[in-house]
Every structure is written in C-alpha cells, then in structure tokens.
Image (tube, grey):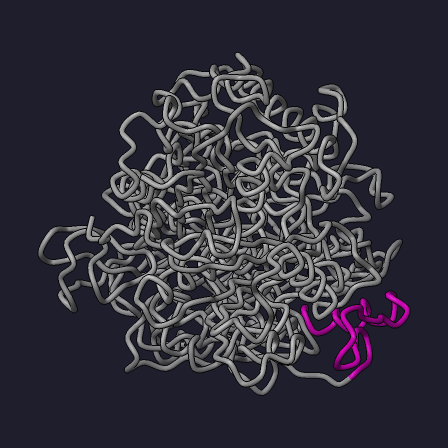
Amino acid sequence: MASRGINDRVAVVGMGCTRFGERWDSSTEDLILEAFAECIGSTPNIAKADIDAYWLGTLGSGQSGLTLSRALSTDDKPVTRVENYCATGSEAFRNACYGVAAGAYDVVMAMGVEKLKDSGFSGLMRADPPSDGTAPELSMTAPAAFSLLDPAYCAKHGVHPDEMRAAMTHVAWKNHDNGSRNPKAQFRSPVSRETIDNAVKVAGRLGVFDCSGVSDGAACALIVPAERALEYTDTPMYVKGLSLVAGSTRGAMDPEFDFTTFPEVVKAARDAYAQAGIDDPSAQLSLAEVHDCFTPTEIILMEDLGFSEAGNGWKDVLSGDFDADGRLPINPDGGLKSFGHPVGASGLRMLYEAWLQFRGDAGDRQLSDPHTALTHNLGGRPGGCVSFVSVVGRELG
Amino acid sequence: MTAPLIAYATYLPRHRLAGADIRLRRGDRVVASYDEDSTTMAVAAAARALDGHPPPTNVYFATSSPAYLDKTNATAIHAALGLPNASFATDLCGTGRSGFAAWRAAAATGGVALTADVRVGRPGSADERLGGDGAAALLFGDGPAIADVLATTSHTAEFLDRWRSPGSITGEQWEERFGAERYAALIRAAVDQILDETGLAEVDHVVVACPNGGIVKRVGTLVKALKSTRTSLIGYSGVADAGIALASVLDVAEPDETILVVSAFDGCDAVLLRTTTQLPLARQSTPVSLQRQQGMVVPHLTYLSWHGLVELEPPRRPEPDRPAAPPAARAEKWKFGFTGTRCRQCGFVHLPPARVCRRCGTTDEMDALPVAGLRGVIATHTVDHLAYSPSPPMLQAVVDVDGGGRCTIEVTDAEPERLRVGAKVGFTFRRLFTAGGVHDYFWKAHLLDTGSENDGKPRDQ
C-alpha cells in the first residue's frame, strides 16, 4: 500500500456529537450548531476564530462548504464539503487530518451531519445523475444489497441458515444492549432476541432489527498537530493510522467474488495497521467501532478486520467475543444499529466513542483502561464499496 | 402474398388469473405480468422464431395495446433482438386487423410479422374472463418453407361491434348478436371465395380469429374442416389471436396439409396455406398447448393493480427517475440488446460494458458479447420488500453467466421461495417501471425448470 503513515502526527483535542434520532425539531443547521457547541465548549483554549479550515461531510443534507459556513458564520474560512457514501464523515476527518499533517493549518475542524428524517421515506435517498435506467443500485435498496451476504456466507462456509440467523440476531441484540447504555443513541432500549427474530422482513432475511437506524445527527472533531495537542487538552486522542480504499467494483462483475468478504476492507485494514504498527489487532486494540449497517456486515467485518478467522466470524459473535465484556468489544456505543446512522456524521460518531472511552467519559459503558481503538466506515455495497479504517490511541508512541 | 412461411413461435406469459377469481367455470386466464407489454412479449416470440435464421430485413409489429404512441415500438424490439441498423422496423397499431396487415406486409416483402396484445377488461367483464395476453411471430422469406401461401382474400365492412377510446385500456362491445350476424356473413363470403379460387372443396384445418364471442362459440358449424377447427386457446387475444391459433395448428399439422386461416376483424381476411415436409423439422420447441399449461397464479387484486384498476399502498420509497434519452441511446447495446464486452487481453467479461478492463486494466480493447441468449447461475439472491417496484416485493439475484461474466439483476416470474444459490436462469426483456411516461426497458432473469421433462429450458418456452 502506498500510504505514507500519519502515525502520531496529528491529534484530536475536542469533539462533539448530538443525540442521534428523529430530530423533528432540529434542522441541519441546528444539528451542526449543537455538535459544534459541545466540541468548542470542551476545548477552552480554542475559539471559533482560531479554527483555520473546515471539512464538512454530508451525503445529501446540503451542498458545498456554504452549508457549514452559513450555519456557523465562519468568517470566510475555507470549508471543503466531501461526500463518500456512508464513509462521508470519516472522509471529512481524514482530509482534515491531512490538512494539519501537511503543515497547511494549525487548527482544523471536521464536521459530519445528516438530516435523513425530513424526506418522509424509509431508508436512504439517492441523488443519481440522469441514467439509462439499468443500474441495479438505482432500484435495489441498501438492505437488499447487504442481505446478499447471508445466503452466500451460509453456502460458502457450510453454516446452517438457523445458525447464521442466530449470529445476526446476536449482533443486533448486542448493539441494542450497548446502545441502551448510551444517552445519545437513537434506540435506548434493549431488544429481545425473539423480537429481533420475528421482526417484519425488509430484504432477504433481514428484518427491521437487522438494519441500522435511519436518523438525524451531527458530530465533529478539532484536529491539531500532535506536538501541540497538550496545549489544548490533557487527554488528546492521537491518530495512528488512516486509510481509504475505493474499490474498482470488480466484484459486481467477477464470478470469483463470493459475497463473503469486502476486499476493500481487508486492504484498508492492512494499510491502517501498517501505519499504526499493529500486527495482532485482537490483542492490540481495546475496542473497535465498525460499520454495522446490517447485521451480516458486522459478522463479515470481524473476519475482514482480522478479529476472526475466515469462516469463524459467526461463531465468535455467538460466543460473545465481541460483547461489551468480550475479548474485543465491538460497537460499545451501540453502533449504527442503535446509535443510529446519520450518514455524514457516522464516521465521526465512531471516533467520538473512542474519544469518550480514552477520557473515561463513557459512563455506564466505560471500558477498563482502553488505549487503542479502530474505527471502520464503509460506503457502497458488497462487490464495490469505499472502506475507511482508522486507528487512534490515547498515548503518543 | 409471395414469400412462404419459414418459422413461427408464440410466447404466452406465465401468470394466470384463477378461474374462481373471475367467475370462469373452467381453467384460468393467461395474463401478462406487470413488467410485460406488447413490446416485450413480441421480443420473446420473435427471439424464438428467429433462432437459427439470418436477421430479417423487415420487422412488422402489430398491436392494439402499444406501449407508446408517436414513438415506434418496433425499434425497441429491433434493438432487443440485436438486428442490424440497416433494416426496416415499423408498427401497425390500433385494431385486431393490424395483425393481418403485418402478415400481409411480411409475406409481401419478406420479414417477420410480430403480433402481441395485452387484453384488459373491466373487473367482472367478459373481456377479463375470456381474453388472453400473448404474442406470435411468423417469419416469411427465403429458406426452407414450412408452409406455402396458396391464396388470400379480403372483405371489408363498416359496422360497430367492438370499440375503445384512445387512452382507455378497457373496451366496449355492442350487443354481441348483432356483430355475430355480420361476421358470419363476412366469413362465409370470404371462405367461399377462397375455396372457389383454389378449386378446393374442403381443407384439413381451419383457424378462426374473431373479436366476437358469438362467432367463436359456433366456429365448428360456421367453417368445416376435415381434421381440426381452432381458435386461440388462450381466449380472445386481440392482434395475436390469429397467430396463436395458427401456431397451435402448426404445432401438430402433418406435411402437405391445407390450413385455412380466417381472420375476421371489421371485415374478413382469409389466407390458405399448405404445409411442407419441412414443418415437422421446424416446429417451435414448446407447443402452444404446453405453454398454456404452465403458469403461476397471480392474486386478482395484484393483477388489477398492474393495470391501474386498483391502487395498492406502495413501499415508502420515492418513485424512480425516468430513464434519460442520451444515456439510454449511448447504452443501446446494453440496455436493449443485453450485450456486454469481453477484454481481448485477459478475457474478463464486463456486464455492463466498461472501457477499462476491471481485471487487467487494459483500455479500449473489448469485443462485444451478447448475453441475452445465454444462461446463468444464481450466486446469491434477495427479496427486497423496501424497493420501489410496480409490484413489490422486488426479487434480485447476482447471476454468473455461463462462459463468464456476472451481473446483479431483477428476477421475474418467480415465487420468492424458489430463489436459491445455484439455481439456473435465462434472460428476458422486460419493462422495469414507467416514470414520466417513459418505459424503462431492460433485461431480467427468470428461473429455468430443473428436474422436469423441460430440464434446462425456460419454463415458458
């Protein structure tokens, strides 16, 4: 991989995140202001005027940097709007980090926001260019695209559909259980396995509880050069590795692709681990926030990120390896599943959980002595996606 | 008529209305699916008839249920069949008689006559009960004849039997007995004339097509035949009526037999054919009678929603955008012809076509690869209850094409529980949806039967 590492070159010194959910009374602007206020309020030595540049991630809740500059009245500072499907928030963060690492700016902000609930429709809306009307992604919804993983995984690994169903249910149960301890989560009630199993089907065997929450929300981060981090906070979060892979979409056309892995995730993880000096992720990571857009996705991510052997992800999930008290807690904040998935905000929301955990601010879901975290954010669908992986840590070096 | 008949085929859609739902005492009613129209059914019939023959230079498409007005529908058929641009394709639209016009034109110039109709009746009507949807293709031209044209005749008369306002999908009929009397006289006159001209006293087979049910009921006494007298075995099928009835004779007739086709629409046209020794070698692969037997029942309410006769609650999803003209034109070979590309360097197949090879990265070294006639295997599948569809839920599969290539594609004419990894599929030209008055034509997969006597063949072939 061709990334030049970013290990310990930049640090996060402030973060904010709104409550996610059906925020009927809040506009995109309101959500941006809410996340911004928490972030700036927690960083006394940084005022708005000190921020040199902004990166705004949103899939469709506004266009151009003006969506942010208008909301915050940012005094003619540069604002770059980025979009990279569901990895949009991570992409805003990644580019903001590079702005600092390049030496161009001293203090920057990455903001992610999405206002999904104003459309009145279920799921995500797409804004596609005029087309010939033949592309499957024009009609096939995201849950359907990810539900393709289930029969393929069962067929390849000889997993009985009932066992796979149990593993998918465990992912949903775990993430709802975690989310019940998160005051900012969209869904804050534990959900029984029976309820998950019997839910109305959305696509394939995916019921509503196998799908991430459609929600409104915003999250942001202040990033500075690592060597200056302690000027702003006693508890900075250092960036150890950042990677992004945009797949060629070959899998969608290649009979050799078997719908039981995301090659883009495997490559992104390899790159980020190399930057961060991680060779045994299960042992070296304290927690991981992964893109659990649909329950089979999380099972396969356990394998692609190196937490489980190929074909064993479902077993490790069922064994509780990734529960809050398991060997590697996955999505302790509830994940996309129960925290909700306001697309542009989700990547930053994942980093927000690492930030809280490192500072000991995670309340009822606080893990014991967490020091290194992974966030994984994915956009697109099996066969062709963008995949982001970061590794962040509590300490330098 | 000059050129002989050299091939024929029919296409009957798979869906059936249960007799009990439409007060039909026996059997069921053949209905086109929501994603079928006269254009797509004509493509299916034509593909079967043209199989093994050089591309025809003339395509005559007749229907009384055209998908478009102002825009020629035969061009979509022409594109879906992958015919060369230097050929003629036209519509003959409006009435049942348009079908005979297509036959006459094709026989006169050589070419294929395609007749297809979707016959819709008001709920509870005789048209709903006694009609049928389908398509027939007759190929005339050079080549071994399966039947020679001995004579034709036509009589024309102005009277009101059936009519339909432009824009309405359901039609009207005057008191049936009035039209029956008129048609009986016209049929007698035409038959007498053609027998006189050819010096025949009687014929082996008679085929009668007529929109008047009174004629169909008494057809056996009206025109005598030595061996069989037939009407369309799916009920009145509009423009396709005569072709479907004729095909059912060609499915079984012996060499050197005479077939008198009587097509009575606002007059009476008759054509006398004599079969050749080539016919038994060139019958369609699945006879009409077998196509008629196979089917899957669609709930009446669902069927009514397909034609806008009731409106069902849709999924909470936005309606799709209409296909845009320039991208559709640029993608004609893919969208209509289902033709991908294969990399000359590494052989990787691209569905849809790509300029840069997804495997080896070579640019612009591709050969066209038509896949419409190929088969494939389901790699994985789903049932999408959330997707916008004219008839939810939408079935989708990732299909690996025999010989290379993969695409994600809708599956049609299938019960969701029949989807499985490893299932074999064929491809069929369909209308995905209509938005802004534009029909989104593209290809879908359909499951092939396995373990039956039709093993490996599409269920509806």
Is residue B89 rendered to the left or right of residue A218?
left
Check the image and name the residue furthest to the front. A231
Residue B171 is inside the magenta segment = yes
A227 and A114: which is toward the camera: A227
Is residue A75 rendered to the left or right of residue B421?
right
Is residue A206 rendered to the left or right of residue B143?
right
Residue B160, image quadrant: bottom right
The answer to whether one can see residue B419 in this image is yes
- Above or below: residue B119 compared with residue A306: below
Residue A382, image quadrant: top left
- Above or below: residue B432 compared with residue B26: below
Check the image and name the residue furthest to the left. B345
- Above or below: residue A66 compared with residue A59: below
Check the image and name the residue furthest to the top. A319
Stretch of the chain drawn in magenta: B159-187
Q: Position of residue A40 (x, y in %)?
A: 63, 61
Q: Position of residue B247 (x, y in %)?
A: 49, 53
Q: Residue at x 48, y 23 (%)?
A: A328
Q: Residue at x 45, y 36 (%)?
A: A373
Q: Position of residue A1 (x, y in %)?
A: 20, 48
Q: Looking at the figure, which quarter contains the C terminus of chain A? A: top left
Q: Residue at x 78, y 59 (%)?
A: B213
B87 and B403: which is toward the camera: B403
B447 and A276: which is toward the camera: A276
The answer to whether one can see residue B293 in this image is no
Q: Residue at x 29, y 59 (%)?
A: B340
Residue B150 is inside the magenta segment = no
Q: How many marks?
A: 0
- Above or below: residue B306 compared with residue B325: above
Q: Position of residue B93 (x, y in %)?
A: 60, 79
B252 and B74: which is toward the camera: B74
